[in-house]
Amino acid sequence: MSDKCPFREGCYIIEEAYIVPAGRVDLGVPLYDATLTVEPDPSGRLITHGAGLVSNVAVISLLEDYDRLDIIMKMGQGFCFHLKNPIIQGGKVFSDKVKSRIRFIPQDSFDQIEDEIFNRWVTSLRIVNGKDENGNGDFTGRHRDQDNTPHPACLCEKPDSEAQP
């Protein structure tokens, strides 16, 4: 578990996040309605974990081709992060039409990245939906419009002012 989280105790809205293959940022699975929580464990040490909605079929599709997954996320301007090799726990919903809640726990690193780098990575992402009947990857295409804004389906509610990182 990572002790490097730069936030104090609280629950934070993640504006935009993607599960990506480790070391690659050209494929990704969007994480919707995501939050990051920092809270004390029974011994008083702060622990970090997050949750969000995801297409399990798409995550499984990534895992068929890649052993390790990372998460890239944006929590507001100036607060973009690359979580390397987080523990990802998900349910057993295997329909491509259903999103289910997953939980993730940072473990290797919680690296801050520049907004420009995050935006460049997300602009180049091909979004994974899962595999088609022939076993080929199924992609929805790029996840940002040409003006570099996220598609409306990816926008979360704006956080309260006290929830800002």
Image (cartoon, grey):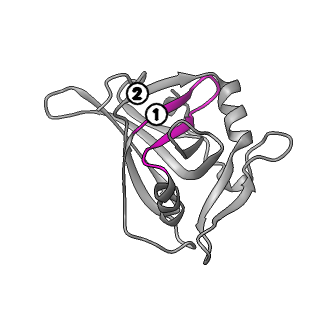
Instruction: Name the residue type under label 2.
Output: Ser
Q: State how far apart marks 1 and 2 are (Cα).
A: 6 Å
Secondary structure at badge 2 equals strand
Label 2 belongs to which residue? 109
Residue 51: x and y in percent read 42, 49
> With respect to residue 107, does 58 lie above or below?
below
Q: Are marks 1 and 2 in contact (CB under 8 Å)?
A: yes
Secondary structure at badge 1 equals strand
Residue 16: say if magenta: no
Q: Residue at x 38, y 50 (%)?
A: 103
* Residue bounds of the magenta highlight: 66-85
In the rendered image, the quadrant that contains the N terminus is top left
Name which quarter of the figure residue 158 lies in. Answer: top right
Residue 102: x and y in percent read 41, 55
The circle drawn on residue 103 is: none
Residue 92: x and y in percent read 37, 69
Name which quarter of the figure residue 48 lies in. Answer: top left
Judge from the rendering whether residue 63 lies leftward or rightward of residue 27; answer left or right. left
